[in-house]
Every structure is written in C-alpha cells, then in structure tokens.
Amino acid sequence: MVNLAAVSGAAFAVACFPAVVSARKAVGTAARHTSLVNEPVALAQLSSVLELVTVPCDAVHVQGTMGANDLVKITGAGWGSGALQFQVSHPVKTGGDKSRSQLASVTCYSSDATDAPEGKAGKCFLTKPAEDGSSDEPQETEVSLPITSHNNAFMFVCSASTAPGVQCDVYAFDNVANNGWSVKTLDLGLSTSTDLGFSVHAEALNTMKAYASSSLTVARHDISLGCKNTPVEEETTPQGEEA
C-alpha cells in the first residue's frame, strides 16, 4: 500500500510488515473488553513514521487528494449487536452542499448474530453502486476479511494505491479467544482518491478512534461529523510497544 521508495532507512523495514501480523497479547481480561488492544508492532511503528495524528471526529473527511504515503486509520474495540459497516463517500458537488454519495461500503456480520440475513452470519460483504451509475440495485460481493464477531477489535487502514483509488488493510483481533491480530488487504475498486470520507457505523460501537496522516487536510470542526473541539494530538506508540 505505502510507496516504499519514499520511506528511507529503518522505516523501510517497518513498512514491510507481513500479510499476517504477529499477535500482541492483551495485558488482562478486563482491558481486552474495554479498549483496543496494542497494535501489531510494525503497524504502530509505521503510524509513527508516517506521522498519523488524531482526528477528533466520528468520521474522516479528506479535503484534497490522498498521496501514496497518506494513511487514514479507523479503529474500534468491537460493537454491540447488528452489523458493523465501514463506508467510503465523496461530495456530490463542491461548494456549500454537504450531501455525499457513497462510493463503497463493507458490512460485516457477527457469527452469532441472530438478525443477520440468511447465510451472512460471520461474513463480510463489499457493496458498491452499479458501475454504469444507474439506479439499479448496488452490487454486493462477499469478501474474505478477518472480522467475524462483534467481539473483534478492528482497524481499517487505508491509503491511495499507485493508480487512482484506495485500498485498505483490514485488521481484526478476537477479544475473547485472544488469538492475535489477523489482516487482509481489500481493494475497494474506486476510481478516485480525492475528497474521500471514511467512517464506521454500528450499534454500541466500542472505543472508536480515527487518525490521518499529518500531511492530509481533513475536516476537524464540523459538528455534523461529530467533531469535538479539542486540540489535535499526534498519535503515540501504544503503551508497551517499542518504536
């Protein structure tokens, strides 16, 4: 995902983290159920190298084009009931109109969900508008992702690919089994990486946090995005990790 040519020295090794990342065990049972467990070491280091900063909002709306080394990261420690949905959108038009069009969404159903559509429990699906822009039903495709339960801590780490568009590394950590982090890369199949909005939605969403590269211009004070009027702080390496 990241343009390694622009990352030098020790950062190169950091950026080359494997497709399946080693587990980081939680300190205690109580902590596992109340907050996001420590990130994989490589991802935490990469976040530091690429200078991610906290976005004090419920969504990340990028103003401008994402470059090859720009990241957006949204994390959570699980959710209550129903489905977890990750959405990517862009403005319908520029100017004062704040209406947005959904470009892609990922919906994951818990394996124990009694209200999941038939055959969808424990699975994730990528939904996109019809390719011809018509009003036909959106196209839904099952995708293999590690998020299988509402007990999963999760991370969506997205960047612009070399061609126009965005791909995301989707991480999950089973907060009950404590088997460690797993990750799959998902190409959203977008034709643009400009003015994108990223958000996660679920009932009783637990400990959602959002981050973006410091090089990106993002909305920080829009009340409609749930922005809090707090200073933006640089993301720090999780406690217990080594930079």
Image: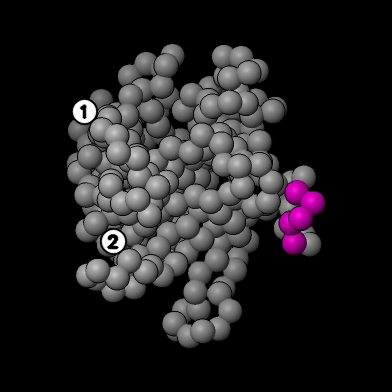
Residue situated in front as seen by the camera: 142 or 93? 93
Q: Is residue 120 visible?
A: yes
Kindly identify the residue that appears in the image at 58 percent across and 49 percent down.
202
Q: Amino acid at mark 2?
A: Asp
Give the residue pinned by disc 1: 9
**x, y percent for residue 33:** 62, 26
Residue 22 is one of the magenta-drawn residues: no
**x, y percent for residue 9:** 21, 28
Q: Amino acid at mark 1?
A: Gly
Secondary structure mainly formed by the magenta segment: loop
Please, is residue 219 above or below residue 104 in the view? above
Quarter of the figure with residue 34: top right
| 64 displayed left or right of 223 | left
Residue 116 is one of the magenta-drawn residues: yes
From the viewer's perspective, is the residue at label 1 or at label 2 nearer? 2
Q: Which residues are magenta?
A: 113-117
Quarter of the figure with residue 5: top left
Give the residue pinned by disc 2: 195
**x, y percent for residue 15:** 33, 35
Please, is residue 75 above or below residue 32 in the view? below
Kindly identify the residue that appears in the image at 27 percent across and 30 percent down.
233
Q: Earlier in the sequence, mark 1 or mark 2?
A: 1
Neighbour class for label 1 at 10 Å: few (<14), some, many (≥20)? Answer: few
